[in-house]
Image (cartoon, grey):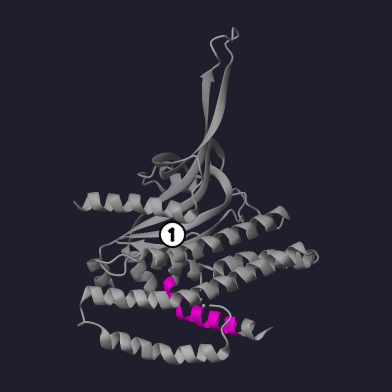
Amino acid sequence: MTDIDVQVELQLKNSLSGQKAVGGRRQEDMSGERQSDCGESKQNTGQRELDEPLSLLADVALAPPRGDPEACSCLEVRRLESSLPSMQLQLQFLMTKADDLHDCLVNGQGHLESDALAAAVPSFLFTCQPYFNHLQSTARSTVSQHTPLPFDIYTRLLDFSQQLCDRLEQLVLTFASYGLLCLDETEPNNMSHFCIGQSQLGRLRLTVFRYCKPAPYLARVDTGLYKRMRWNVERLRDGRQQQTDEERGGAREEREAETVGDTEYYFLCYEDISNAHPEAAGDSQGVSHGTVGRMWSIGQWVQVNPDPDSEDIYDWIMCKVPRASYHRLLFLGSDEPSSCSATDCLQQLLLSHQTSEGC
């Protein structure tokens, strides 16, 4: 290992231990871990660690009186700006680890070693979770009630998230092409999708999942719809109720169970639409030709079977695979959106609904 490798390893471990609180609970699939910037010498790193407390002290000394929202916002923005290099270094570390797994497989390691590598992939995806969570929660929150996150910081954070998402997707697809991972949702141990972050918007908590390749909307029924992303949206109690629950004490899991309300499921899907049109009037045979266009949309999972209003537990026990209709909410056109831009679109939908409900 080189000096820089040792430095990066140490910085990553320190980051992961300090950021576990960001990870959130493991919902349905997962939840994860994260940190730091490249090429610095040990001397520069040590000097920066000495300078940072002095810089922070200067920020506090020069800040306007406590409680001023603009002052708090400026300080927080400066902290975020200073943390970007370390986040980029952590991204490079995780990308390198993904490349190492890929290269070990492609270069040929023997049957037993390939199985061991395949087992390492889900574990590696899990360790990326807190990094995804930190990027998403930081980018999709506001610095204060009055000041949104600066656009340049916002775009850089989401760019880090998008880069890692794309690399992990390719890693899973490569292992699947070697027959070491299954992407079929009907199989119990499939790796059809993975979690790419969690964030909170007011009383809504979003957990985002990315499908490695388009999958049928319903696992056992052909609906013509293919899903690419899923968002689990949990409705939480208001802040006053959550604070009351925390004041009561008790285990974190118990407080969390008390504050989570209903969960809704949203999907990014596409469908191929045939646009048939009659041939030119001079064609005596009246043959119709058509073109097929792909349409992307965001829609909501609407439970059909079992009946969501049924109180009979046997309806749920006897149902092997739930079925649902797809309630289209937003058409996105013929071009597939990135995972970050699709989440932006859903976020705007949810916020607009929150605003209308609050009026």
Q: Which range is magenta?
A: 7-22
Residue 325: image quadrant is top left
The residue identified by callout 1 is 207
| Whether residue 45 is situated above or below residue 80 in the rendered picture | below
| Whether residue 299 is situated above or below residue 121 in the rendered picture | above
Residue depicted at x 55% and y 37%: 221
Considering depth in this image, is 189 or 223 the residue closer to the camera? 223
Crowding near pointer 1: few (<14 within 10 Å), some, many (20+)? many
Task: Please provide percent x and percent y for residue 141.
Answer: 35, 65
Q: Is 68 positioned to the left or the right of 133 in the image?
A: left
Considering depth in this image, is 250 or 216 the residue closer to the camera? 216
Considering depth in this image, is 338 or 27 the residue closer to the camera? 338
In magenta segment, residue 14: yes
Task: Please provide percent x and percent y for residue 127.
Answer: 55, 71
Instruction: Say if residue 135 shows up in the picture.
Output: yes
Instruction: Identify the amino acid type marked 1.
Output: Thr
Residue depicted at x 63% and y 57%: 170
Residue depicted at x 42% and y 49%: 266
Residue depicted at x 52% and y 55%: 210
In magenta segment, residue 52: no
| Whether residue 153 is situated above or below residue 309 in the rendered picture | below
